[in-house]
Image (cartoon, rainbow, N blue to C red):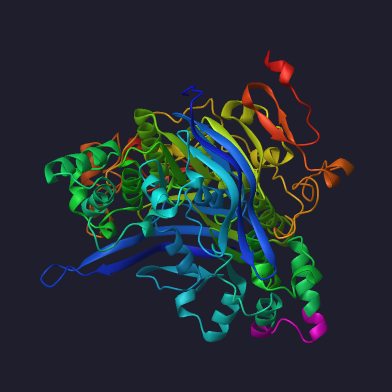
Amino acid sequence: MSLLEIENATKLYKISGGLFGKEKQLCALNQFSMNLEASPASITTIAGESGSGKSTIANLVLGFTSLSSGSIRFRGKDVDKMSSAELYDYRKSVQAVFQDPFGVYNPFYRIHHIFKMAIKHFKLAKSKKEGSDLIEEALNVVGLRGEEVLEKYPHQLSGGQRQRMMMARAYMIKPRIIVADEPVSMVDASLRAAILDVMLKMRDQQGISFLYITHDLSTAYQIGDRIFILYQGNVVESGDTVAVIDQPKHPYVQLLIDSVPAPDPDENWGEQIDVPDEEETRFSDAIGCRYIGRCPQKTDLCVSKAPILKPLAVGSQHNVSCHIYD
Amino acid sequence: MVKSTEKTLQVKDLKVYYDTPTGDVKAVDGVSFDVYKGECLGVVGESGCGKSTAAYGILRLVQHPGKIVGGKIDVDGITVSQLNEEEFRKIRATKLSLIPQGAMNSLNPTMNIGAQIKDLIVTHEKSLNSTDLSHRIDGLLRKVGLPLRVVKMFPHELSGGMKQRVCIAIGIALNPSLVIADESTSALDVVVQRIVAQTLKNVQREMGVSMIMIGHDMGLMAQMVDRIAVMYAGNIVEISPIKEFFSNPRHPYSKVLIDSIPSLKERKPLKLVEGITHDPRNPPPGCIYQLRCPLANETCRKKSPSWRNLKEGHQVACHLIEDEDHVAA
């Protein structure tokens, strides 16, 4: 049974054309579909550059913005049409971890506050004792002990610890899905592994699925199961993470992977590249492939017709949206 | 790589402390290094290790409650740490320049790009006629690969990558001897980061300018720098030519840094790191890395390690490593 189904999700923003200009619609996310099975739990990566629509997906799933068209279904129920009791359950089942481990804390409260708030709101515990047991268990999952951290203030902890604390908070609510929006991008490299490890543990031992939203392909490669790569609101390539990154098909994904600096002084970056800024392809009335402005392999077809996302071969899990593979 | 023995910058025992009610935080605690002419030196380390503070210490841009406690800084053979504030101001941008971390926030939103570059040149060089000036600005923009229409544009009209390239243009406008690039590409997308980093490298090569590149992305360091210095809790613990560093890191902390680079080639188990850095107000006696070092022994807890000289200018501060001077012969 599918846990979360996103079907043709589209998000448009109106852009004013000035006093006499025509109002335009900017397409932040175009016809995005994905399906998350209830089991086994998995880590689905959504990757792309700034403005590619990856955070829009997070915001839609978390209900921070509403869809322009399409639907999001949780256990078969449309999230937009849920009753308040169902929505309460949905909010409990879908938790979030955000990018900035410094900004999410209120500096005036001790760490235990964020846990106690969640317990109170979701009525997780019947007594104080039960509550503190819950907190302790959640902290143990992320490798921390209550006595070390709960009485401290946020500024007394490192970025890595704070982010693990957010993971623990999300875990304590026992969700089915955690939307992790760039959870490691502001954490030091040496501490990143600890957070990624928590994600793997939660997936394998607790059956929690992740929507891992990131611009960093290398961490996705290390822990992700499936990947969707977005460019200007469209999925350009999707499939098994290792398959996509080992053998990228779309010209954009090829450039993206090629541009990750190799941690090896003997392996050179290749020649200087340049990309023109391409804004007009983002509007909803644009026809043709959105990548034409930068694509070295474009043809006339790419200008007149937008490619659709389809499997590389019949039955393949590896999908690409490019006319080269028609 | 440019091999030169001429030193553009010599830093000796630089100390920058932050004043707090419970004692001084020793953000940079006795850092010494040289930058050779035409060389790019990378400085890496985790957040809070003092890498940016060291750069600001060199530029004398440390703000209260920070204070420069000591150290001698020579630029092109001139001891700039003795100069008074007005004399030092003239050194900034002409000899020492900075490409700051957030290009988004370091440009003036009310001035167009041309005016901002002009402002800098006119402040430092006074008499220049307007044709020369606009030629010079055009030349700078061309050098960083920006179209000339950018002159008339305002910061909000530019993308992050373009703004960062404007900052590079401003950084090199007065032909400085040394450019300090503080995390200048870390807020950019991978593809744009590559473009900006390659622009920076090309400009540096063409002008033969020395550069200090501060960052935490080891991949970027591998691509960009000639030598690398690893900082930990206000101290440099290893300094090495880049190839030697990646093939043979010696300090336990450097090994952690290299091991924690996520690979795009093979999927391997994650490496977890234990231990927490000490309170920077109160470093333990002995080696500063002892609390996180899996190999720390009695000596490490008592005595701070001196520099061990390995081959080809590779230096490391660790008790567990022997001098290798004879190898060089």
Give the side of residue A99 with respect to residue B117, left or right. right
Examine the rendering and report whether any part of residue A225 can be seen.
Answer: no
Give the side of residue A279 with respect to residue A44, left or right. left
Please tell me which residue lies in front, B240 or A252. B240
Q: Residue at x 63, y 34 (%)?
A: B239
Which percent across, then down, holds residue A301? 23, 40
Please tell me which residue lies in front, B285 or A121. B285
Q: Quadrant of residue B255?
A: top right
Please tell me which residue lies in front, B60 or B310. B60
Q: Residue furthest right?
A: B298
Examine the rendering and report whether any part of residue A36 can be seen.
Answer: yes
Q: How many labels, in total?
A: 0
Give the side of residue A86 with respect to residue A67, left or right. right
Which percent across, then down, holds residue B149? 18, 47
The answer to whether residue A123 is magenta is: yes
The answer to whether residue B58 is magenta is: no
Image quarter (top left, top right, bottom left or bottom right) of the C terminus of chain A: top left
Find the magenta span and give its range.
A120-131
Give the side of residue B284 with respect to residue B205, left or right. right
Q: Quadrant of residue A200?
A: bottom right
Which percent across, then down, holds residue B266? 62, 35
